[in-house]
Image (spheres, coloured by chain):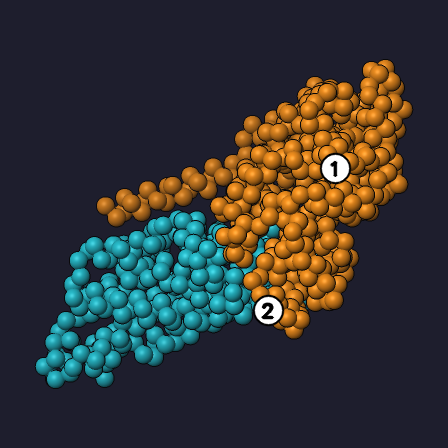
Chain colours: A cyan, B orange
Amino acid sequence: MRKYIKKIKGYYLLLPSLLGFALFFIVPFIGGIRYSFSVSGFNNAFVGFKNYKEIFTSEAFSLALKNTGIFMGIAIPLIIVISFIISLIIHEIKAPKLIKMFIILPMIIPSATVAGFFRRIFGTSGFNIIDSDYAMFVIILIFIWRNTGYNLIIYLAGLAQINKEVIEASEIDGANYFQKLWHIIIPLCTPTTVFVAIVTIINSFKVFKDIYILQGSYPNPKIYMLQHYMNNKFRDLQYEKLTSAAYVFALVIFAFAFLMFMIDKRYAKKVGES
Amino acid sequence: MKRIIALVICIIIVITTVSCSTESSNNINQQNDVQNEITIAIREMDYFQLEGFNKILLDYTDRFKRENGVKVNFDVISSNSSDEYSEKLNAKLHLKDGPTLILIPDYQTYNTFIEQEIGLNLKDGVPYYNKVYDSLLDDSDCFVPIGVKYLPTVLHKNVLDKLGIEVPSFDWTREDYLKIRGKWLESEPRNFTLSQYWELVYSPITELKIIDEANKKVSLNNPKVKEFLKAIREQVYSSKYILKPEYTYENYHNMIVDSKSKEYQESREYERNNESENYTSTTYLTNPLRSLDTAVEFDMVVVDEKIVLPYVLDSDSPVSVWGFIVNRNGMNIELGLEYINGLLSDETQLSMFQKKDDIYYPVNKDIEDEIDKIEEEKNINKEAIALRKYIINQIKKGTFSPSNQEMRIYKKLVKMIGSDFSKFIFTDEPYTDEELSEELQKLEDKYNMWLNE
């Protein structure tokens, strides 16, 4: 009996979190499917895949999907690489806390301040890139500037966990720094990288706030994202299109997360594995 | 220790689950209260203006509560922007027994509520619905207007006298207006301000029919628009306007696009300080349909006498209404319909006309004779009466539909197009025909995408 109680105790402790997660995420996620197959948010008549067909033929949705894909395809790998390099440097040189603080600081600056700052530099009174075809560059810059600090914290923790004996053993075997990096540090950091990638994807959704403050509901088409499309649909009470777009996006994210886990499974090395 | 923590958590979960599902005897009383209650969803800034601009709603609500024993709640929604307000309101509309009525102010469009089947058809549910002027009603019969406002064109008499122009009569035309503007510009060079820009650009955009609302289509890449841009550029750089020598395209763009920019602030300040030298007035706020109010102003002898005339500049509607949409998912819809019906009654509508703390005119066409009687009894300025009747005739003829019936995005689009045009008007080097075609096509594609989002 005691063994049984000991076994299920853990589940009881998890229960509040699981209940909350189910109530606020799983249930709405499943419940929203109904809207995507209905005439509208206020008329439940079943229409099959009509809403999905309409969004895929919508120029605005296609543009939003393309821009979001470009943004995530460039910004996420870039920020992962930059955060890793900076964390490696900080880890190696044992940089003072002040430097870490300055890198992390942009995370806590309000979006309105960030938008105002970037508008001054890249808006009409500055280089005027926000209204041009290269506006995506500004958005990627904002994203990297704001979120590198967050990834830095995770990577520093990951690097601190690497067993020093493995590094010392490789040094004894005559490995140079780049060989250590390629064969030991990066593989051992793969689980951390997968976690950073997933967290970065989640943080990438927040860039919509900065673009919205910069340019409103209908920005420069080059930076019109999926969140703009969904936000506009919510404002216009078109819940059927909103949920359809959200599920398409969720599928893309699931596919990406699955890819990350496969990479983790394949390339992550444990100590002692050949 | 771990056992104690686990036990405490289990107890908390049990208590929470039980308390959420228990029905108490209080619920029966609560249900009775809810049956005698309606809720009106209203934006915070509109709610705070009711006392000064729409007192009839507050007074009628008090009377309705007293006479019917019904609780009327105002669900005041605070927001920093119209988009934020829409999002907060939309979240409430999804609730079972959500707000009964949605107050639509005179500056807001309501098509979204009708297209998404939120509004209830009111024709049969509101007996007094047929008392409303036909041109103010919507084809869907899901919106009921309660009060109407009209935006006139107001001229400064002293400026007309200086120009040697006679005061136009009510049946003046757009050409008369443009003649006055032309003569004003020719008399001496004028400082180029933001208002001057929008005067040059806004009306022609609507007159060129660039936006086809019915077919959701924008047409920019055509000879009409190119000629228009060329003509505007020539006008701006003619001797009619004084341009700031230090200003480049960026300065003008800031002035037009960014309301927080230094250029915008400077332009607005100049306009405020030099209002009386302009041929039109932008500070006149009285609804010319409210003859009791306009009569008082017409009787006053003032230095900068204002001439109030019907709007003629373009096909943009000067008529706007405030009213209600009934939420089909709302609580106590029958009571909500009764509430609206009372607002349309002869007595309430007449009271609106006479109330000092109100800026709207009645929508009830059956009380016109009563209004005539009131005007005669008070022996008010005949010109004010004539103006009211002229405008009412326009409303009866259906010359204008309320601007609330426009597409939600329409005015936004016109402003966006006008802002984008600044690029072609203030550019240092004029665009060639091919370059202009390319740019206009890009804009056209962009706006068609927004329109059909």
Amino acid type at circle 2 is Ser
Is residue B350 placed above or below A3 in the rendered structure? Answer: above
Q: Which residue is drawn at 20% across and 82% down?
A: A179
Amino acid type at circle 1 is Leu
State left or right for residue B310 relative to residue B118: right
Q: Residue at x 24, y 62 (%)?
A: A157
Residue underneath mark 2 = A62
Density class for disc 2 (Cα within 10 Å; few <14, some 14-19, many ≥20) is: some
Q: Residue at x 65, y 58 (%)?
A: B233
Q: Residue B380 at what x, y percent from top left?
A: 82, 19
Density class for disc 1 (Cα within 10 Å; few <14, some 14-19, many ≥20) is: some
Q: Nearer the viewer, residue B141 or B367?
A: B367
Residue B31 visible, this angle: no
Q: Nearer the viewer, residue B240 or A260?
A: B240
Query: Which numbered dot is residue B163?
Result: 1
Per the model, the C-alpha gap separating discs 1 and 2 is 56 Å
Question: Mark 1, chain letter?
Answer: B
Residue depth check, mark 1 versus mark 2: number of the one nearer the observer: 1
Question: Mark 2, chain letter?
Answer: A
Q: In which quarter of the image is the N terminus of chain A?
A: bottom left
Dot 2: what SS?
A: helix
